[in-house]
Amino acid sequence: MHRCLSALILALAASGAAAQDENALFDLGGDRFMAGQSVSMQQEGRDDVFLAGERVSLSADIAGTAHMAGRWLTVTGAVGEGLYAAGQEITVEAPVGGDATLAGQRVDVTAPVAGDLRIFGSEIGIAAPVEGTLLAAGEFVEIDGAVAGDASMAARTLEFGPEAAIAGTLTLYEDDPGTLEVPEGVIPEARIERREIEEWEHDYGDYAPDMGGGAAVVGFVLSVLLVAVLAACAAVFMPGTMAAMRARVLEQPLRTIVTGFVTQSALIGAAILLGMTLIGLLLTPAAIFLAIIAGLAGYIAGAYALGVGVLSAFGRDVPDSTGDRALAAITGALVAAVVALIPLLGWIAVMVLTLAGIGAVTIGLFRPRLFAD
């Protein structure tokens, strides 16, 4: 799982930084990694694939697991094991040999899933058999396939086609239990349990450990994706600024950490002091907002500097091209995310990295006299 998670983050971050007509591609053993604006995986004989971009398609059969992220995702090649996909529109038109976890605005599954299917979106369509269990949450859900196991669904509108059937039990989460109609031919009412929609969070808010970690992957990726993409874009579109900041962090780490500590302390302290006065109380939200923005900017700058430092340790030169800058941003985001998972020490390391980034930003913007070159 850790290998898959790390590789998926690499692909996701690369998608934000790749040039419009360029794809980043490399192979590791039988696995393939691809990222770019438009990504098409057509090579046969691969095991696991990691694909990310605006428009992503998997048209070749693979033996292992597919990890996909982007805007429009299409699967027309058979997946031997699991499928993890997150995007705006997802279409699965080829069979999946294992479990599938899908999250998007519009998600359509028209090919069989041999394992469990977990699907989340606004509009959901399932027109194929599911050999395992089905977990679906959406605003509009349409089922036109047989489910061999149990099913749990949360929906505002629920429709069933002629091929729909549920062999196990059905748990429905509704705003008003009893309002969603389920044909007797799909499942007898005696095997339906109806619950309040508020119970969904209680029952499935922490479902990941029981479902192979699919939700953990999606949640972790989404939390890291913002920083990874912003760092990559900043490095590509503001190469001079980012180069100056990463140089400060790497060459004078203590200086940037102290500067960052002073800057963030001033912003947080200003929020507290303003809150102690009646007149300044109205400005407290602005001070808090600036502290949050400073923290995010610092983390982005720090992550990029970390990526350059890690790559330099492995003998790579200072980034001087779009690809090199994107790779540095990807590496930094990945390493920072992994370090953050370390109990106790992780959050301390992330805080120090963030303060160093804030210091680099402060020095670049304001050139404080105390720290002038």
Image (cartoon, rainbow, N blue to C red):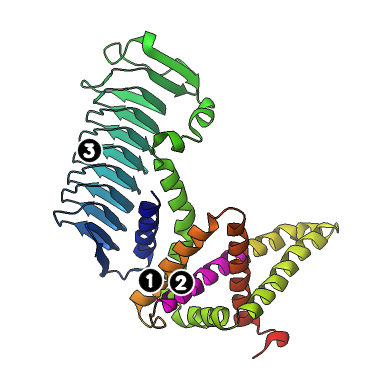
Q: CA distance from mark 3 to mark 1?
A: 33 Å
Residue 214 or residue 189, whichever sits in front = 214
From this view, report whether residue 209 is shown above or below residue 246.
Answer: above
In-image side of 209 versus 104 (left or right): right
Residue located 58% across and 58% down the image: 346
Which tag, 1 or 2, sits closer to the chain's start?
Answer: 2
Extreme top residue here?
190
- The quarter in which the C terminus is drawn is bottom right
Q: Report the number of discs.
A: 3
From this view, report whether residue 265 is shown above or below residue 174.
Answer: below
Query: Circle 1 sits on which residue?
Result: 327
Q: Is residue 164 magenta?
A: no
Mark 3 packing: few (<14 Cα in 10 Å), some, or many (20+)? Answer: many
Name the secondary structure under disc 3: loop
Q: Callout 1, which amino acid?
A: Leu
Residue 19, horizontal then vertical, whole percent: 31, 71
Extreme left residue here?
44
Query: Circle 2 sits on which residue?
Result: 307
Which tag, 3 or 1, sits closer to the chain's start?
Answer: 3
Q: Callout 3, which amino acid?
A: Gly
The magenta span reads 295-314
Q: CA distance from mark 2 to mark 3?
A: 36 Å
Extreme right residue here?
277
Residue located 50% across and 23% down the image: 175
**Mark 2 and mark 1 in contact (Cβ < 8 Å)?**
yes
Query: Circle 3 sits on which residue?
Result: 97
Name the secondary structure under disc 1: helix
Residue 20, horizontal then vertical, whole percent: 29, 69
Residue located 45% across and 37% down the image: 209
Which tag, 2 or 3, sits closer to the chain's start?
Answer: 3
